[in-house]
């Protein structure tokens, strides 16, 4: 890509990244949403995903600390509230903990990240470091996987409720608010990226940042599939489902 894209063309290229690389196409997610996962596999997914969820406000705090634009900081800090809540017992992280409890995991183990796969830790750390260290424009662009999340959330909720009798609507309450939150977050991030990627090199960088974020999510599912589906090699110290 050598020519400068219009904002509309850049958005189209970003959406193409999701069509090709978003993790809704991963075999583990296909299993999860179609009812093929065992309860232990669902537990492993919820546990490992919690480590990712718990670090979202951490990476967002890094981004806010780096932003010189008060408007961007004001818009972005809502993400901290969405995940941490305004007080104890509120927010997306709390709702994800309730999901973990509902599938049979101990809250204290989940909060301590006990049994999380090494690859999950490395992937999450890589994402946090990316947001902390890469140019702000790329850090903002890496959040744009939210462009693709409404479809996966809808499929996840419908599929899990249809196929797993240990999952209830209350278990999945995390996902109730996410589509609207994601829509708002996308508007902020997409407007910033299309306004500030002013050269072909910057546009290539924001596309690459979104590809990197897709790779992070894909790598986490690769690790789950390798450990709990095939070839079922659970690393030492990782969560072992009950027989």
Image: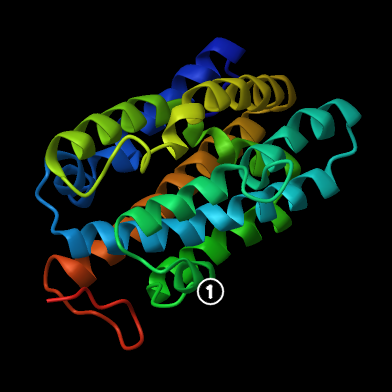
x 90%, y 38%: residue:
68
- Picture coordinates of residue 186 (x, y %)? 58, 24
Q: How is the image coloured?
A: rainbow
- Asked whether, in this view, residue 239 is left or right of residue 11, the answer is left
Residue 206 position (above or below residue 189): below
Mark 1 Cα-neighbour bin, 10 Å: few <14, some 14–19, many ≥20: few
Name the residue carrying label 1: 112
Q: Residue at x 54, y 27 (%)?
A: 182
Spot occupied by residue 64 in the image (x, y as percentages of width and height): 80, 44
Q: Quadrant of residue 226?
A: bottom left
Residue 239 makes an appearance in the image: yes
- Residue 31 x, y percent position in the rendering: 14, 48
Tally the marks: 1
Quadrant hosting residue 132: bottom right
Report x, y in % for residue 181: 57, 26
Q: Nearer the viewer, residue 184 or 129?
A: 184
């Amino acid at each position: 890509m050598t020519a400068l894209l219009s904002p509309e063309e850049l958005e189209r290229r970003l959406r193409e990244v999701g069509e090709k690389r978003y993790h809704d196409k991963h075999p583990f997610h296909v299993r999860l949403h179609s009812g093929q996962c065992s309860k232990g596999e669902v537990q492993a997914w919820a546990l490992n995903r919690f480590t990712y969820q718990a670090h979202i406000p951490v990476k967002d705090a890094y981004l806010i600390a780096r932003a010189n634009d008060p408007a961007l900081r004001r818009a972005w800090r809502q993400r901290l509230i969405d995940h941490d809540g305004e007080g104890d017992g509120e927010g997306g992280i709390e709702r994800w903990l309730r999901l973990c409890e509902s599938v049979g995991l101990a809250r204290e183990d989940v909060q301590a990240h006990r049994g999380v796969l090494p690859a999950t830790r490395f992937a999450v750390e890589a994402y946090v470091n990316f947001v902390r260290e890469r140019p702000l424009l790329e850090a903002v662009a890496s959040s744009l996987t939210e462009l693709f999340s409404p479809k996966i959330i809808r499929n996840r909720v419908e599929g899990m409720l249809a196929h797993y009798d240990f999952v209830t609507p209350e278990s999945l309450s995390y996902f109730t608010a996410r589509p609207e939150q994601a829509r708002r977050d996308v508007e902020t991030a997409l407007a910033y990226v299309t306004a500030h990627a002013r050269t072909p090199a910057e546009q290539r960088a924001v596309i690459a940042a979104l590809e990197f974020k897709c790779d992070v999510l894909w790598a986490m599912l690769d690790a789950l599939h390798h450990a709990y589906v095939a070839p079922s090699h659970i690393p030492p110290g990782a969560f072992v489902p009950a027989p």
